[in-house]
Amino acid sequence: MEPYAFAALVTPEGEGTRAVQLYRAILSAIRLGRAAGALPSSRAAAEALGLSRNTVNAAYELLRAEGAIAVAPGAAPRILPPPPLPPSPAPGPTPPLSARGHQLAAEGRPWPAPTLFAPGRPDEALFPRDLWALALRRAARQPQGAAFAYGEFSGLPSLRAALARRLAADRGMRVSPEQVLVTPGAKASLTLLAVALAGPGDAALIEEPGYNGARSAFGGAGLGLSPLPVDGVGADPDRADWGCSPRLIYVTPANQYPLGARLTLARRAALLARAAECGALVIEDDYDSEFHWEGRALPALQGSAPDQVAALGTASKALMPALRLGWIVAPPALAGALAAVQRALGLGANIHAQGALADLIESGQYRAQLHRISRTYGERGRAFAAALRRLPIPSVADPTGGVQLTIRLPEGVEARAVAALNAAGFGPVPLSAFCIGEAQEGLVAGFAQATPERIARFCEVLTWAL
Ligand SMILES: Cc1ncc(COP(=O)(O)O)c(C=O)c1O
């Protein structure tokens, strides 16, 4: 190689002695395919680079030791081809999903429908953007101490304390901050409880029709599911098969999902008695009980039996599902062990979002947000139900809380109605999708985004499908 072309290719720099710098620069040029054939003699290279011959000889020696060049007396150093790479193994197939993975993938697949009037969706326009941005900024500027790493995995102490105070005052819970575990949402809470309290082959009772998120969380943990039938006043413990000896019982007493019933006091007492007989934990999903606009919300079941009930809450309805913020109020005797399982599974929540939520609760802004959305969702829900009552279908009661209602349909109409509404840009979910036993026909439709025009169009399309 011509000495001055060689000098233009290599720039000795960086750490180490001059010889090491030169060695690195030449090696890099060889590896990148810029230098080939033979290097200049050490004398010619030293002259072209303005370095001493000793320096060049030391660099060449390092290259020889590396196997990058061969040096023979009286000849220019020869660049060697790179050593052959070890043969790469034949490409193997991608491992398949397990049977459980297949089941969960089927359950978790997004519903292939528009999101307008889909159940469980709050209205994005009601998210308090500016308040949240300020609270989040304050939270991000706080030094976190133990919470910075893994020290407060079950939640920021300030949020656990704020939630305990609020849930005691507003939901009648008997709760200390140590019982509150902050999680990435109610679904994660269900997974945590299922894994910690039951094993493959154990049974769980879930409301029928009921929340499909509970079905997938329990199914994912390998539990067998048995229906807990629901009627106009909520889950009916007398109609469940208690022979399965459930380890877990999933209920939504404040606002049954998806039918909207409020569990009566008599049913509450019967449920707790049955659960005590078989030693089961009752999971009370209090997912949207915080905004009730008809009468007073009944206090949480947890308040009557804090040792038997784990109550779940979530910020998904009052603020935004994608925040992924929820909480478990655990029975005191289980709280420590559940916190350890939570850490083992890595089911912690984002610390800045937790700080922002604690800030909103303590400043009263969270309660103000609940009032705001209750008023709006109340109006929209009542307007939607009133319009539906004018159609030739079983009467739809005014919703008393939450963001969705259920429309019962005559037999054989559900699939046609869903298809027509989907085609018109609406995303209600068939009621049959919420059943594990005999399918019930109807539509579960959200009303958080219901404007008079959208309600009118929805009813028009539904009438056509009937
Ligand atoms: C009954 C019920 N529980 C909980 C949730 C919310 O769960 P997450 O906190 O995981 O968003 C929903 C959402 O639709 C729900 O319908």
Image: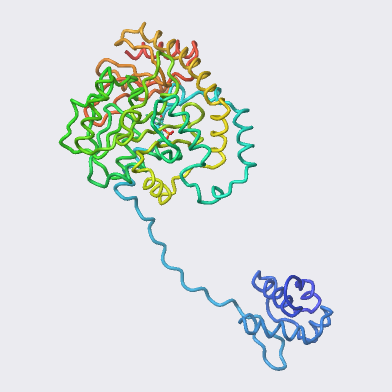
The image quarter in which residue 201 lies: top left
Please determine whether, in this image, residue 75 is positioned above or below residue 99: below
Residue 103 x, y percent position in the rendering: 31, 42
Q: Nearer the viewer, residue 212 or 64?
A: 212
Q: Position of residue 269 (x, y in %)?
A: 25, 25
Percent of width and height locating residue 420:
38, 19
Residue 114 appears at what percent x and percent y? Answer: 45, 26
Horizontal side of 412 relative to 321 (left or right) equals left
Left or right for 323, reference 331: right
Q: Position of 353 compared to 337: left or right?
A: right
Q: Quadrant of residue 402?
A: top left
Say how many tags the image has: 0
Asked whether 23 or 93 is in front, the reply is 23
User: What is the quadrant of residue 12 in the picture?
Assistant: bottom right
Residue shown at 27% from the left, 24% from the top: 268
Q: Could you say which is closer to the camera, residue 122 or residue 461?
A: 122
